Image (cartoon, helix red, strand yellow):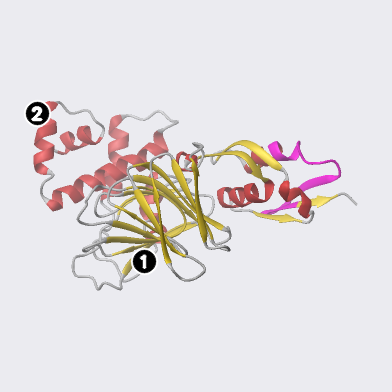
Amino acid sequence: MNEDILFRYVTDNTDANETAEVIAWLRERENMERYISLKNAWVNAGLVFRNETATVEEIQEVIKKATKAESFTKTPQKISLWATYSRIAAVISPILLATTLWLFLGDNRPEQNMLEISVPYGSLGHYVLRDGTEVDLNAGSRLRVKEFGETREVYLEGEGYFKVDSNPNKPFLVHTPEMDVKVTGTAFNVKAYEEERQTSTTLVEGKVTLEYLNQQGQKMRLGLLPGETGIFDRKTKTSSKKPVNGLEHSWKDGTVRFKDLPFGELALRIRRMYDVNIVFETDFVKSNRYSGSLDINSPLEDALSIIRISLPDGVTMDTKDKTVFIRAIK
């Protein structure tokens, strides 16, 4: 396959004949892997050149360097992609706000072996799994990918937005510590941070079923339709549904939007976005509610300044190193 045609196909610049040629070429598995590698490298290159002027030749050079990196087809039983992929990241983006990887599990790997992805605080991650499923991971999240067989199973700690390729014969399962999400093909957001009391799933399109155990240890199911958010309370072991407010998965585009959110919960989001610790020396402030948005590319001080001006009288906000102190004036 002519590499120039592939570059044009990745960037949606092929004519009808070239598109048909590429699609036929992609039927071969090894060709699909090559295409995914190019496509993912292009996405990463876009992170560098979005706000800069670059020629097509310069962008192609970045892609070529990235796709010469080591393959993930022969990985150890457990790997940290953040560390292993740093060589490509160094070429592509000096300040890594997101990464896109093609994750491939070998056909003969033992079932207990898993691939692990970790996204640190202050970052976002975008990944393409072996079956074509796209996953966006929020800051402070971890995803373990089990080898895909009769089912497609992943284990999530944190928050992820999934766009699952439809395959009714191979259900896609997202396991969280307290709840499982079962789908065949759909787009949905799962939030399951350990430090939060609630686990939630927001359905964008398709259909999902939530499975969990109640206080009596009985398996319960809750079905969701597009536009619904299912919430599981870890303390009471009960579930509920509410309409989507459009803010649940805004984070995947680099902007956290919130409405009438208690400061205590907002502090957790700021902590993940900016990798800072927030200490409340005045607990009553946690119940203050805020509405607005935060851009992950904005400095921490910009986010804090919005909150600082609306603090109650007698309460101050001070920053030292990577810790923010909320305290009453004595």
Residue stretch in magenta: 306-325
Queried whether the magenta region covers residue 310, the answer comes back as: yes
Going by the numbered disc 2, the residue's amino acid type is Asn
Q: Is 62 a magenta residue? A: no
Tag 1, which secondary structure?
loop
Q: Are marks 1 and 2 in contact (CB under 8 Å)?
A: no
Q: Residue at x 13, y 44 (%)?
A: 26
- Residue 308: name its quadrant: top right
Q: Is residue 100 among what the camera can see?
A: no
Q: Is 51 placed above or below 311 here?
A: above
Q: Position of residue 45 (x, y in %)?
A: 36, 40
Q: Amino acid at mark 1?
A: Ile
**Along the viewing direction, whichever of 286 and 34 lies nearer the viewer:** 286
Is 78 displayed left or right of 16 in the figure? right
How crowded pointer 2 is (Cα within 10 Å; few <14, some 14-19, many 20+) is rated as: few
Residue 286: image x %, image y %?
72, 50
Q: CA distance from mark 1 to mark 2?
A: 41 Å
Residue 284 screen position, x and y as percent: 78, 51
- 90, 262: nearer the viewer: 262
Write down the residue under mark 1.
79
Residue identifier under label 2: 17
> Mark 1 or mark 2, which has the lower sequence index?
2
The relative height of residue 165 versus residue 143 in the rendered view (above or below) is above
- Viewer can see residue 233: yes
Badge 1: few (under 14), some or many (20 or more) residues near its Cα, within 10 Å? some
Label drawn at residue 156: none
Tell me which residue sits at (58%, 59%) in the image: 197
Residue 232 % position (x, y) = 50, 56
Q: Image point 36% across, 66% down: which residue?
A: 79
